[in-house]
Image (tube, rainbow, N blue to C red):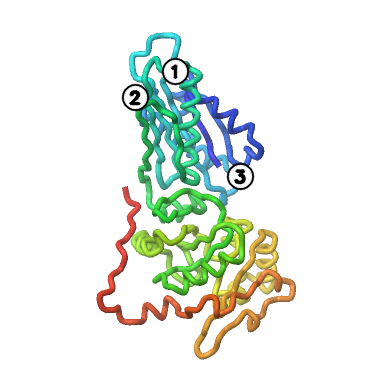
Amino acid sequence: MVALAIAGGGSGVIPRLLTRPGASRTVLEAQVPYGRRALTELLGAKPASRCSPEAARELAQAVYRRALRLRETPHTPVLGLGATAALVTDRERQGAHRIHVAVVDGFRSWEASAHLRKGARTRAEEEAIAERIILGALAEAMVGGEFDLALQPDERSSIEAVSLAHPCDVIACGEQPWATVDTAGRVRAGGPLPGIVLPGSFNPLHKGHAALLEAARRRTAGFAAYEISITNVDKPPLAAAELDARLAQIRGRAPVVLTRAPTFVEKARLLPGAAFAVGADTAARILEPRYYADADGLAKALAELRELGARLHVAERRVGDRLLRLDDLPVPPSAVDMFQPIPASEVAIDISSTELRSRPAAKGHSEPPPMSFRT
């Protein structure tokens, strides 16, 4: 969800957003701090310039902090958008006609600007461009994509992403509940809900993971993604450098969902309706009562998973000298329909990351370069 502060020019985008069906699921609040005192009060200090990239960024950060307080649940990713513009007015404007927008999500500041030629358009026409760049910057911060401002050859625009913090830092403290790392390595708070996710540590990533993800993708609508939790029930939290290295293996292959949700119930709360692809050994652990608070904990967890729309696609796995199948697991009768088998013939490769780590490094093998999110 997003909180917006638009200091005048481009504020027509607010009714465009609010009149869309379902807008209440996206817009937390929208402010128009038009006057100087209103702008100063929102920022907490008088800005050096009312229309600048810095002012847009300060506005975005101010309403981002408000969004963190205003969201109804900690499971909701939030953004702050700030925009300021100098457009056609009823007096001679000294500076250039320009629009600056920033969208802050804790990980990055997505910043867009456009400089327009004086006298080329009416106020309404410049307002339309301001609205397009605001919507374009918001879309870029949420899901990515390109937008056309229909500028003239001598006019210019830009959009860039400035790193603010490492994903580990933002997610570990609960500031953002989850994030998506796209195939190019860009981090965004939240994102489109995947149809199915493959949770794991991916230390290292191997062909079995890719085969399982593809087998799971064929069984559900929507896109497929890996999921990495920076906290784990049985392991210490992931350090930033270690997360960078694991993400570098996956870059260019599939999106990655980052969470701090070690259990499947917590994952399902963040990703309602998503299915999960797991090995039979992982499914066996999900069904172990010792991971739950009391004797009824497992039943309650399975009931909540059902309510959240979760399904588990379970691949056969070799454990020791036997092939572990879904049929071998003690799935309660009330939850049988939530578990679907994936035969070993579809996954083809049955090897674990633990086994790979125990092997000597292959001659000539080199690790992928780590991905850095530091500023």
Q: Position of residue 251 (x, y in %)?
A: 39, 59
Which amino acid type is marked by label 2? Ala
Dot 1 crowding, Cα within 10 Å, few <14, some 14–19, many 20+: few
Q: Is residue 332 left or right of residue 23?
A: right
Q: Which residue is mark 1?
A: 121
> In this rendering, is residue 241 above or below 316?
above
Q: Residue furthest right?
A: 334
Q: CA distance from mark 1 to mark 3?
A: 42 Å
Which amino acid type is marked by label 1? Arg
Q: Residue placed at 49% from the left, 50% from the top?
A: 176
Q: Residue furthest bottom?
A: 321
Q: Which residue is mark 3?
A: 72
Mark 1 vs mark 3, foreground winner is: 1
Dot 2 crowding, Cα within 10 Å, few <14, some 14–19, many 20+: few
Mark 2 vs mark 1, foreground winner is: 1
Does dot 3 land on a helix, a strand or a loop?
loop
User: Which image quadrant is residue 55 in?
Assistant: top left
Q: CA distance from mark 2 to mark 1?
A: 28 Å
Q: Please indicate, yes or no, whether residue 74 appears anywhere in the rendered image.
A: yes
Which amino acid type is marked by label 3? Glu
User: Which image quadrant is residue 85 in?
Assistant: top left
Q: Residue placed at 48% from the left, 53% from the top?
A: 179
User: Any mark on residue 48, and which?
Assistant: 2
Q: CA distance from mark 2 to mark 3?
A: 34 Å
The quadrant of the picture occupied by the N terminus is top right
